[in-house]
Image (tube, rainbow, N blue to C red):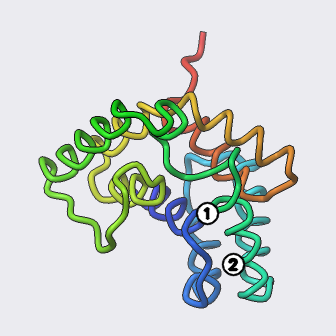
Amino acid sequence: MQRYKLLSALLDYPTAELQAAAPELWEIVEEDPGLTEADRAALRTLIQELAETDLLTAQEAYSGLFDLGEKVHLHMTHFRYGDTQERGQQLVAMDQFYRAHGFVGERVEVPDYLPLMLEFAGERSEAGESLLAEFVDIYGELEAKLAEAESPYAAVFTVLKNHVCPPVAA
């Protein structure tokens, strides 16, 4: 599903290729019928910021937010298990889940790295959505922390929170 590949790209470390792909990313946002106008606006803001910010500045901001921060990072099992043996077991299970579904990512990442999980969901929709759904409670927490930091990356977690396991209408 294009949406998951889009979100994966947006959450990955900023590169010149990502900046150059901004028009294509914008097009995916515009063509996704499942996004609300608020989702589109928030994602457009993130895409625009990534495209217009000096690459080194964008990379420093990303690292400060996701790599160096204690509150916000992109390894989903860390939120639930911390650095415990249980987390290690979950990582092994996730790796086996990827392999059972014929997915071998192009890059070597820890299996709970959210951009990798989104890449998987983009290629194996049903299995990927079930994996993403296991962490839906964390997306709202990350969305709130990023919104508090006034980061446009909050948009990615808003979309995940609202669309991976959307609330059931009463």
Q: Is residue 69 left or right of residue 106?
A: right
Residue 6, percent across and down? 52, 64
Asked if 5 appears above or below 127 in the picture, the reply is: below
Q: Which residue is mark 2?
A: 59
Q: Looking at the rendering, in which quadrant would you find the N terminus?
A: bottom left
Along the line of sight, the residue nearer the viewer: 123 or 146: 146
In the rendered structure, which disc, 2 or 1, sits on the residue that comes first in sequence? 1
- Residue that lies at the very extreme toward the top in this rendered image: 170
Along the line of sight, the residue nearer the viewer: 70 or 76: 70
Give amino acid for label 2: Gln
- Residue that lies at the very extreme toward the front in this rendered image: 84
| Mark 2 Cα-neighbour bin, 10 Å: few <14, some 14–19, many ≥20 | some
Residue 122, percent across and down? 37, 57
Residue 113, percent across and down? 44, 54
Say which residue appears at 56% left-offset and 46% top-offset. 34
- Disc 2 versus disc 1: distance between alpha carbons? 23 Å
| Mark 1 Cα-neighbour bin, 10 Å: few <14, some 14–19, many ≥20 | many
> Judging from the image, what secondary structure is the residue with disc 1 in?
helix
Front disc: 2 or 1: 2
Q: Quadrant of residue 93?
A: top left
Asked if 42 appears above or below 15 in the picture, the reply is: above
Q: Which residue is mark 1?
A: 29
Say which residue appears at 58% left-offset and 82% top-offset. 18
Along the line of sight, the residue nearer the viewer: 89 or 118: 89
Q: Quadrant of residue 36?
A: top right
